[in-house]
Image (spheres, rainbow, N blue to C red):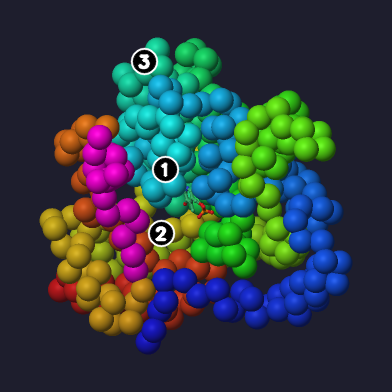
Amino acid sequence: MQVPLLDLKPQYATLKEELLKEIAEVCESQRFILGPKVEKLESEVAAYCGSGYAVGVTSGSDALIISLMVEGIKAGDEVITTPFTFFATAGAIVRVGATPVFVDIDPKTFNIDPAEIEKKITPRTRAIIPVHLFGQAADMDPIMEIARKHELIVIEDACQAIGAEYRGRRVGSIGDYGCFSFFPSKNLGCFGDGGMVTCNDPEKAKRLKIFRNHGQSGTYLHDFVGGNFRLDALQAAILSIKLRDLDKWSEARQRNAAEYRRLFADAKLDEKITLPAEATYPVRHIYNQFSILVADGRRDALRATLQEKGIGCAVYYPLSLHLQPCFSALGGRSGDCPVSERISGEILALPIYPESTSEQRAYVVETIAAFFR
Ligand SMILES: *Cc1c(COP(=O)(O)O)cnc(C)c1O
């Protein structure tokens, strides 16, 4: 049996006709940049996320960069974030000239540990970027409280978490900005790169729109230096159609996760591996990934066995960002973020995509059981 880590083809098959018709319509219009399709998607995503505004941008990475630019965060400023995330979170901070300051993670949720944040705040700190990793919300209440106390901007990296909730609120609507990615492997993916920034402040929304178009505030009048961060009409049109099915897909991922939990418990494997923990605060976890922990240095051997048996799996993320060679000038050392460092050696993502089958999950669990026998 083959179990890919992700297979986007069955999802495409269910929407193919409608998508191709919509793509043809955009081609007939020959309006490819911003325009009505992008505006339609923006109002749909704002409503879906419970945010006042949404601004379509070129990618999740650019969503982070433009949010930092709009706030004027620059060289000499510090931005607190997690070392256990996709590279772009910290990359964006460096791209605007600022300095990432890494705060270790909670070992259960893999998200930034709010109890560690205040120790890292200095007079140069300007913002906090919590990441809702794998589709589970970071603990936003204490993060927002610290931010208010120290007058810091909060930029939620919700790139893996569209539709996830924290205490009944959608991620991206809690901080000053919410950053989303429509990279194909996210729960809502387009046919290329795409992203979105949400916010509740009309002034911030206005500035985001100016900055995504080279800071142009009137015809060829530039108050700021922005960039080209414009979303394509084609991607927006595709996303509007796919957004209608997003909850169905995220619920299928939740069912698949629940089934894994039953199967692992039945096989008594919950003693050999650690299943992804649910947060102690109320969340809606959308399971962009289902990542287990394999202790005792056996992760890489299990990964090799699964791959040999036709099961897709991956390590997100094998190296804590404070130890990345490109950030060595920041002086990060091994031992600085011990939880993140340990987890990066134990973590392994298993197939969880909506259309994966019970038979496939049973095979994954049986193969892991055989590995430990
Ligand atoms: C995917 C992702 C990004 C970047 O999104 P792109 O659209 O690929 O640029 C940023 N942060 C996190 C946590 C992500 O998962």
Kindly report which numbered mark, 2 or 1, lies closer to the viewer in this rendering. Answer: 1
Q: Residue furthest bottom?
A: 1
> Mark 1 — residue?
91
Q: Residues within 10 Å of mark 3 (few under 14, many from 20)?
A: few
Q: Position of residue 250 (x, y in %)?
A: 58, 59
Q: Secondary structure at mark 3?
A: loop
**Image location of residue 129, percent across then percent down:** 47, 33
Q: Earlier in the sequence, mark 2 or mark 1?
A: 1
Which stretch did the figure color magenta? 313-329
Residue ID for mark 3: 122
Q: Secondary structure at mark 2?
A: strand
Q: Is residue 166 visible?
A: no
Q: Nearer the viewer, residue 241 or 2?
A: 241
Q: Is residue 63 visible?
A: yes
> Which is more N-terminal, label 3 or label 2?
3
Give, as a three-letter code, the residue at label 1.
Gly
Q: Residue furthest left?
A: 296
Which residue: 58% across, 59% down?
193
- In the image, taking residue 149 as reference, residue 241 lies left or right, namely right
Q: Answer yes or no: do the residues labelled 2 and 3 have beta carbons within 8 Å? A: no
Q: Which residue is mark 2?
A: 290
- What is the crowding at mark 1: few (fewer than 14 residues within 10 Å), some, or many (at least 20)? many
Which marked residue is nearer to the observer: mark 3 or mark 1? 1
Residue at 67% from the left image edge and 40% from the top image edge: 214
| Amino acid tagged 2 | Phe
